[in-house]
Structure formats: structure tokens, C-alpha cells
Image (cartoon, coloured by chain):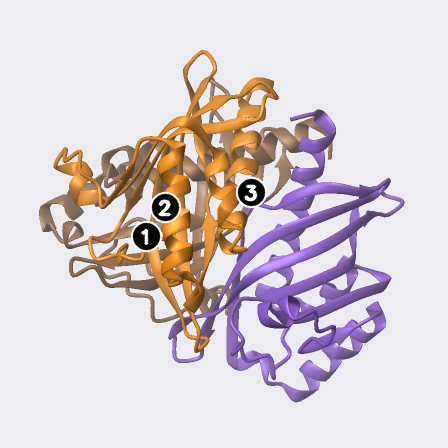
Chain colours: A orange, B brown, C purple
Amino acid sequence: MGVSAADSLLAVMSFNAAYARVIDDDDLERWPDFFTADAQYRITHVENVRDGLAAGMVYADSRDMLIDRISALREANVYERQRYRHVIGMPSVDLLEPGVLRSHAPFLIIRIMHTGEMTVFASGAYHDEFVQDEGSDLKLRKREVVCDSTSTDTLMAIPL
Amino acid sequence: MGVSAADSLLAVMSFNAAYARVIDDDDLERWPDFFTADAQYRITHVENVRDGLAAGMVYADSRDMLIDRISALREANVYERQRYRHVIGMPSVDLLEPGVLRSHAPFLIIRIMHTGEMTVFASGAYHDEFVQDEGSDLKLRKREVVCDSTSTDTLMAIPL
Amino acid sequence: MGVSAADSLLAVMSFNAAYARVIDDDDLERWPDFFTADAQYRITHVENVRDGLAAGMVYADSRDMLIDRISALREANVYERQRYRHVIGMPSVDLLEPGVLRSHAPFLIIRIMHTGEMTVFASGAYHDEFVQDEGSDLKLRKREVVCDSTSTDTLMAIPL
């Protein structure tokens, strides 16, 4: 593996670790910072992807929409009744074009209810495009969250 | 950690990410490509390993047998009724002999039924030996899939 | 990512892989070796942490206490009735002070009962402080195991 490929892999791994932590620590106001201003964010499932359906269960095409979403979540106050734990697997990373990385990473999300009960809430894969900002940090310009199950309950609209 | 050790670790991590993706994306015809022509592949469980039993639940000693297995799966058409999601943990890697890496990596596999129900299908560890081919890519010359549970249903013989 | 940051990340990843393996392989007598002689080890849950309660469910402030704990486990002979499988996610690592790394890593632990039944036993995050010993290997001087669920059964006192 070349130095550059190793560096990209480690950078994406660190990004995903930080991303998961912000959600699981309920530090949601920092979540939109992982995206570019014009980022696309979509939650969908494998059957939609296979059938070429553009419509996802949740869709945003700017960071402002993500900020609004967090505000709505806080007002609805539904999030606090449960917790989540993301475990994100090793990414596959390649160079899509100069300055843009394409990444695929599997994930597993556990939901912990207020009663203490734990269940597998969602599994799937992130299909991502990353760009490097001025400080050479990565930002997502596109994250497609492809859930394995068609019955994952995303009504709550928590970030995945 | 030396440069060489870091490089081996990253190479195995990338390999495992690609391996899991091929299975979970139902791109099974590419699965045998991760093995050498004379590779050994075995699915077994901890009690067999502890008792020194060579017999596994599933066994192959060449890539051709793996190819046959995928053909049989496709004909039986059982695979499509369910999906799997592998999450493979960090490997421990060391040099077994020049050009051969030995690796141990934990795994967790979620099964997603057609109904959307998700369950923990299997957990365990991969006990691996990797060789480098001409292009310096890794290939498995041996993968022993040691399941934690003796009751993991491998009748379906999906690749783990 | 600088060389030093990449190196720290890989070193912590390798440490966590080895740590999990020792527990899951029931090689528990080697578990205390991952800690410094005066290490703090605590198992707690998010509500305790949020409320600033110092008291954890399990607490030790030296390696000798960890050694004692393993002896007690072996005498009680409760551990063998079940197995565990740790999957530890990507760590976030930074330099706390010269020679000391601070790390945060999510984890998921599956319990496999003697009957073969598998359940999600615990999820959470390790909050760690690592120091480098003479051989430049990492040792934990502090590991706080913060479980997501308040109902995780730690009576058995298996190492997490």
C-alpha cells in the first residue's frame, strides 16, 4: 500500500470514529460540521438502491438542512428516550478525482432503550464522497446511508 | 510500530473490508478471488478447535471448490431470501515466515431476513494466512472461520 | 495526518485488538499485563458519568487488584459457562501530555451462552489513558469502561 493510500485510509477511519462519537455522545449540534455547505445526505435502503429509486427515506442537500433537522429533533425531544451506539467497520477508500475520496464503510447501530434493553437497530453501509478543506481535514460532500433492512424505523430521524 | 508492521496491518484491514463487502453486496462470484488456487477454507467452531478436531462444518482445499460452492448456492437460490452484514474488527498481524502473514480478526455477522428482522447470526474470529501475489496484493492461502457458537446454522453454506 | 498521529492510531488499534483477543480466547491470566502497576480500571455506565458519580460498578486501582479478580473468577468457575466476543471500533486518539495518549473507542460485546444463543451483552466506549513502557509498547494507566445501558449485568465481573 502506498503512503498516500495508507494516509487516506487512516484519515477516513479517524473521520468515521469522530462522526460516530458525536452522535453517540448526544453532541448532535456538532454533527452538521462533518459536512460541506452543499452536502447531500440521504438515508435509504438496499431495495431502493437496487431499483434505482432516487427517493430516500430522509433527504437533505445542504448543511443548513442538517442543522434544521437537529433543531427539530431537540424540540421534539424524542431523542433522549433512547441512546445509540455506532460501530463502523473498516472503510474501502479510493480516489474518485483529485481531492475527492470515495469511501464505503459498513456500520452496525445498537439502540439502547431507557429500560436498558439493547437491540440491533440498523446495519448497512455508508457510501461517501469526501473532500479536503483548507486545514486538510476531511468533509463529507455526500453521504448515502444504505440500510440493509427495509423496516428500519427512521421516523425518529436521528442521524445515522 | 515499524513501517513494515504498519503496512501489513493496513493491508490486512483493507483486504478484510473488501472481502466483507463482496459477500454483503451479494457479489459472490468475486469471493473466490480472495484465495490462492490451493487455498484451504474451513468453517468450524471453538469447541472443535479446542478438542483438536480437524473436521469443520464446511471445508474446501482449493479455490475451485469455492467456485463450485457459489454455483451451488446460486442454483439453490436460497441466498436471496436473506442478507448478511459483516463487521470485522481490528486484526492482529504477525510475520509467520518471509512473504506470509498470519492474522487473527474478530467478526460479527448480522442476518437480515426478508421481513426486515435483524439478528446476530454469528460471531467468531478469522484465523488466516496471507501470501502476497505478483501485484503485491494479498491472497488467503488459509482462512479458518472459528464461530463462537456451536449452533450457528451453516447448512445454507453462505460464505462467512 | 502526520506520521506521529498515524503511528499512535495504529498502536492503539493494535493494542485494543490484542486486549479483546485475550479476553475472548479465555486467556484471562494475561489480561492484567495490559495495565501499568498503578493502573485505574473502572466499569461504569453513562448515567453515572453524566451525574459525575465517581463510583463505578467495578473498580480497581492497581494491577494487583486485576490479578486478584481473575483468580476469583477462576475459583468461582462461572466464566466457563459463557463466552464473549468483543468488537472494538476505531479509536479517536490524541496526545494528553508528552508520552501519554488519550483514546476513546466504542465497543460492542456479544455473549454466547452454552446453548449457543447469542445476545448483545454490552455496548459502550473505552475512555483510556495509555503510556509507553521501555519497549515502546503501550500500557493502560487508566481504562474507564462506560456502558451504554444501566442494566448491563456486571455481577459476573468478567473483564470488559
Q: Residue furthest front?
A: A75
Q: Residue furthest bottom?
A: C76
Q: Name the residue type under label 3.
A: Ala
Q: Residues within 10 Å of mark 2 (few under 14, many from 20)?
A: some
Q: Name the residue type under label 2.
A: Arg
Left or right of residue C91: residue A98? left
Question: CB under 8 Å between callouts 1 and 2?
Answer: yes
Query: Where residue A112 appears, x then y in whole percent?
Result: 43, 67
Query: Where residue C83 appears, x then y in whole percent?
Result: 51, 72
Q: Check chain identity for marks 3 and 2: say if they share one.
A: yes
Q: Residues within 10 Å of mark 1 (few under 14, many from 20)?
A: some
Left or right of residue C28: residue B52? left
- Label 2 resides on the chain identified as A
Q: CA distance from mark 1 to mark 2?
A: 8 Å
Q: Residue A18: which disc?
A: 3
Decide which of B153, A28 is in the foreground and name it. A28
Q: Quadrant of residue B2?
A: top right
Decide which of A157, B75 is in the foreground and name it. A157
* Eye-nearest disc, 3 or 2: 2
Q: Disc 1 designates what residue?
A: A157
Q: Identify the element where label 1 is drawn.
A: loop
Q: Identify the element where label 2 is drawn.
A: helix
Q: Identify the element where label 3 is drawn.
A: helix
Q: Disc 2 designates what residue?
A: A69
Q: Name the residue type under label 1.
A: Ala
Q: Residue C25: in sight, yes or no? A: no
Residue occupying image coordinates x 41% and y 48%: A70
Query: Where residue A142 appears, x then y in whole percent?
Result: 36, 29
